[in-house]
Image (spheres, rainbow, N blue to C red):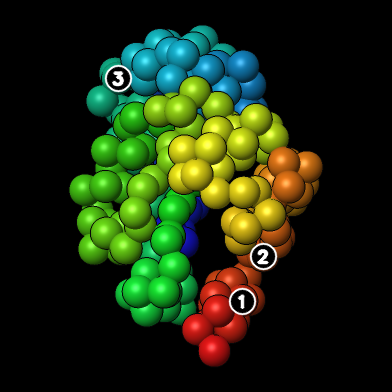
């Protein structure tokens, strides 16, 4: 629902570190530090320290954060326009692998879009990430809903596989118009 561009992150870091953005692209990994950060086990300062070591680039924490939050692009307009009517008929929840720095940024940038959700389940707050089936079970337990009664849409096939393992009605959709078509069908 919220658009992202990792390339923008790399370009921002490169400009601030005065290195080629290909350096970040070539060396980027979703490693243990990434997972620890997204489950709330380490804060952004520790994550940035580990990234500095990993990339061999020294930058101020503010520079790491500026790049980190450069990820956001425009929300998926076709999807966002459906949210008000969907929210009248269904309980809407979002489940995102994220961290406190990103959450603060997207909550500030997109309050109107996010207002349609009853709750945002953020990995750094619940201590679990997609695609782990236990993460989906935690969300279902919180909303007091059987997994098979939850429609889950994600652009990542591994996340969809994890959701299906947990028993959710999960769909792998990454094209904006395909997501909008699936959601619009709920309004018919």
Residue drawn 53% across the image and 18% down it: 36
The mark that comes first in sequence, 3 or 1, is 3
- Quickly name the residue at label 1: 182
Badge nearest the viewer, 2 or 1: 1
In the picture, measured across the screen, residue 175 lies left or right of residue 91, that is: right
| Residue 153 image-quadrant placement | bottom right
Image quadrant assignment for residue 26: top right
Q: CA distance from mark 3 to mark 1?
A: 41 Å
Q: Are marks 3 and 1 in contact (CB under 8 Å)?
A: no
Distance between mark 2 and mark 3 Cα atoms: 35 Å
Q: Secondary structure at mark 1?
A: helix
Please name whichever residue, 68 or 176, is drawn nearer the observer in this view of the structure: 176
Q: Element type at marker 2?
A: loop
Left or right: 22 as drawn, with respect to 1 = right
Residue contact at pointers 2 and 1, CB within 8 angstroms: yes
Q: Which residue is denoted by mark 2 in the rendering? A: 173
Q: Circle 2: is it few (<14), some (14-19), or many (20+) Cα within 10 Å?
A: some
Residue 89 vertical placement versus 142 (above, below): below
Q: Which residue is mark 3?
A: 61
Cα distance, mark 2 to mark 1?
9 Å
Q: Is residue 161 above or below residue 116?
A: above
Question: Could you say where residue 184 lies in the image, as x and y percent from the top left?
Answer: 53, 82
């Amino acid at each position: 629902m919220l658009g992202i561009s990792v390339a923008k992150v790399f370009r921002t870091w490169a400009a601030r570190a005065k290195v080629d953005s290909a350096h970040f692209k070539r060396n980027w990994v979703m490693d243990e530090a990434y997972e620890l950060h997204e489950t709330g086990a380490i804060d952004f300062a520790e994550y940035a320290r580990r990234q500095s070591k990993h990339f061999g680039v020294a930058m101020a924490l503010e520079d790491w954060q500026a790049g980190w939050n450069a990820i956001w692009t425009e929300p998926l307009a076709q999807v966002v326009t459906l949210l008000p009517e969907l929210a009248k008929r269904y309980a809407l929840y979002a489940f995102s692998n994220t961290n406190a720095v990103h959450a603060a940024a997207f909550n500030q940038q997109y309050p109107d879009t996010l207002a349609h959700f009853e709750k945002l389940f953020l990995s750094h707050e619940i201590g679990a990430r997609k695609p782990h089936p236990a993460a989906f079970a935690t969300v279902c337990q919180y909303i007091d809903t059987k997994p098979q009664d939850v429609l889950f849409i994600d652009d990542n096939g591994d996340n969809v596989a994890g959701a299906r393992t947990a028993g959710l009605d999960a769909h792998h959709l990454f094209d904006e118009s395909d997501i909008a078509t699936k959601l619009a069908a709920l309004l018919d």
